[in-house]
Amino acid sequence: MGGALLRGWLDRELADQYFVIEPNAGSDPFAGRRGVTVIASPDALPASLTPDVIILAVKPQVMGDILAPYRRFVGRLILSIAAGKTLGFFARLLDPAAPVVRAMPNTPAAIGRGIAVACANPAVTPAQRALCERLLGAVGEVGWVEDERLIDAVTAVSGSGPAYVFLLIECLAKAGVAAGLPEDLAVRLARATVAGSGELARLSTASAARLREDVTSPGGTTRAALDVLMAQDGLEPLLTRAVLAAARRSRELAD
């Protein structure tokens, strides 16, 4: 996710200088990019560095292990995109007065089509909040919540959501093969159908339900498929269970 954000910022020339902390620095895909300095450890950061913002983009399971070297930057804005790690977590491990924004973006940020929802602690200034808005807004839409508990649901819907959509493409292509299509054509149809439908939904003022109804003729082929997908044990309850499982896991990662 951090790579997706950085890729979007680089493409839009949002800043002049980025330091990337990557233990396997030799294999980092951003090594050699103009304005990007890749180093293996935060200990190698210049002693005089006063960053505008520190982006924490590591797996939540290791967040507690990597924070100590950043205590010298307390007072600088922290932007965390780690699922489950609460504002209180950073207050305990860094400093109660540290300005921290917790955000959940998603991977379409890499092409400028992401969406992120953020929550700030009381130490974040209006200027720092505006900086986060610029960073996240440069690669997609931005929303804010005051109730941090909502971030778990955001994580489950939009943070993890691209994986659900990619799975839909996989399943639709496999279903096409099962119906007799060559695999390459089935994959092409599935990709284009999901991408085009998503763009239509984005640009239309109609609800998703209205768009679905516009495709569905009584007694037609789409209706036959929807009778399966919209059955009592169909897509809606399945997806609801999936989202609730992701939200539950997000809360567990806070421990």
Image: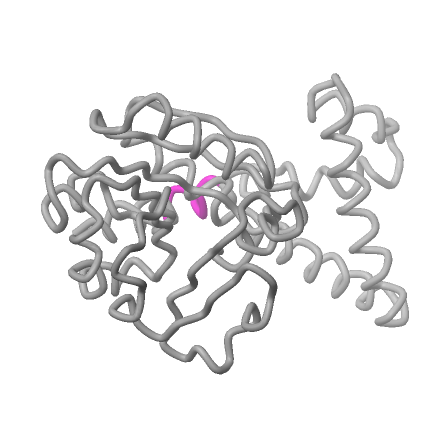
Q: How many marks?
A: 0
* 186 lies above or below 199: below
Q: Nearer the viewer, residue 192 or 94?
A: 94
Q: Nearer the viewer, residue 248 or 160?
A: 160
Q: Report x, y in % for residue 162.
A: 58, 50
**Residue 131 vs residue 113: left or right?**
left
Q: Residue at x 60, y 62 (%)?
A: 34
Q: Is residue 243 magenta?
A: yes
**Residue 130 vs residue 48: left or right?**
right
Magenta stretch in the rendered image: 240-245
Q: Hey, which quadrant is residue 229 in on the image?
A: top right
Q: Is residue 1 magenta?
A: no
Q: Report x, y in % for residue 198.
A: 73, 38
Q: Nearer the viewer, residue 3 or 40?
A: 40
Q: Residue at x 28, y 32 (%)?
A: 149
Q: Residue at x 51, y 41 (%)?
A: 158
**Residue 209 vs residue 102: left or right?**
right
**Residue 130 vs residue 68: left or right?**
right
The way the protein has been coloured in the rendering is one colour
Q: Residue at x 32, y 36 (%)?
A: 101
Q: Nearer the viewer, residue 83 or 243?
A: 83
What secondary structure prevails in the magenta region?
Answer: helix
Q: Report x, y in % for residue 103.
A: 39, 39
Residue extending farthest to the bottom is 26
Residue extending farthest to the top is 205
